[in-house]
């Protein structure tokens, strides 16, 4: 059983995240989408809300599950027997951070490798914070997030 882990804040999940989830899921027997719980990073949606949104997003896929973790990613990866950590890359600006993160994770554990997946051209400028800001200002984000996320954003800003 080849398991991969797709960690992130998902605050909230966007179509860019979904695209990576569905593409990565084709490559592995089991994909765990894991919400990072970071007490030092202020989040907009609670971990429970982010998990609920992701669970609806992966509802139709038996081999995709949703988890959460706090602390070292490599420890969580080892606990769930993940072979790979999936990360998405958009513009060059993502590269430096992702590069450092993957090297640090490799330094911490050689048992898990990071695999980068390039964004789909339609989502290269889609990020959670931008989606939140547009939704807050009343802009249309229906083609940037899945329907369940649009519902949560509308509820929050109505
Ligand atoms: P984090 O706080 O861990 O960066 P994010 O939820 O912002 O969490 O992102 C999780 C992962 O998904 C990161 O690797 C990020 O680069 C990737 N990602 C975010 N948005 C997109 C997108 N539109 N296309 C491809 N990858 C994306």
Image (cartoon, helix red, strand yellow):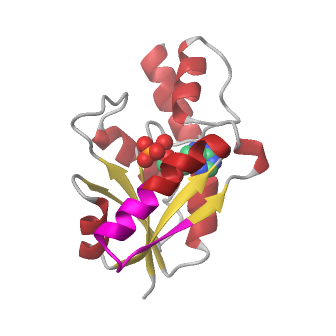
Answer above or below: position of 42 versus 80.
above
Instruction: Assess whether residue 149 is covered by the magenta stretch.
Output: no
Residue at the (37%, 46%) spot, across then down: 52
Answer above or below: position of 40 versus 119.
above
Count every numbered label the image shows and give the total.
0
Residue at the (55%, 19%) spot, across then down: 133
Please state if 121 lies on the left or on the right of 37 as rendered.
right
Q: Give the range drawn in magenta.
A: 101-115
Residue 16 in view = no
Please state if 97 lies on the left or on the right of 116 as rendered.
left
Image quadrant assignment for residue 24: bottom right
Q: x, y (%) of residue 105?
A: 36, 64
Q: x, y (%) of residue 58?
A: 50, 59
Answer above or below: position of 36 versus 149.
below
Q: x, y (%) of residue 135?
A: 57, 20
Quadrant of the image containing the N terminus: bottom left
Image quadrant assignment for residue 131: top right
Q: Which residue lies furthest to the right in this view?
A: 121
Please state if 154 lies on the left or on the right of 39 as rendered.
right
Answer above or below: position of 137 versus 96.
above
Q: Residue furthest bottom?
A: 1
Please state if 51 lies on the left or on the right of 133 as rendered.
left
Residue 146 in view = yes
Image quadrant assignment for residue 85: bottom left
Q: x, y (%) of residue 108?
A: 29, 68
């Amino acid at each position: 059983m080849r398991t991969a882990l797709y960690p992130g804040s998902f605050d909230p999940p966007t179509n860019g995240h979904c695209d990576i989830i569905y593409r990565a899921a084709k490559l592995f027997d089991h994909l765990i989408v894991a919400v990072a719980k970071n007490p030092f990073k202020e989040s907009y949606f609670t971990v429970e809300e982010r998990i609920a949104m992701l669970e609806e997003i992966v509802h139709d896929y038996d081999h995709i599950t949703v988890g959460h973790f706090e602390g070292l990613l490599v420890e969580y990866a080892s606990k769930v027997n993940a072979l790979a950590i999936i990360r998405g890359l958009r513009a060059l600006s993502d590269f430096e951070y992702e590069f450092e993160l993957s090297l640090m994770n490799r330094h911490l554990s050689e048992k898990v490798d990071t695999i980068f997946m390039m964004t789909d051209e339609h989502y290269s400028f889609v990020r959670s914070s931008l989606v939140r800001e547009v939704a807050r200002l009343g802009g249309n984000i229906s083609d940037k997030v899945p329907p369940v996320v649009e519902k949560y954003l509308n509820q929050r800003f109505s």
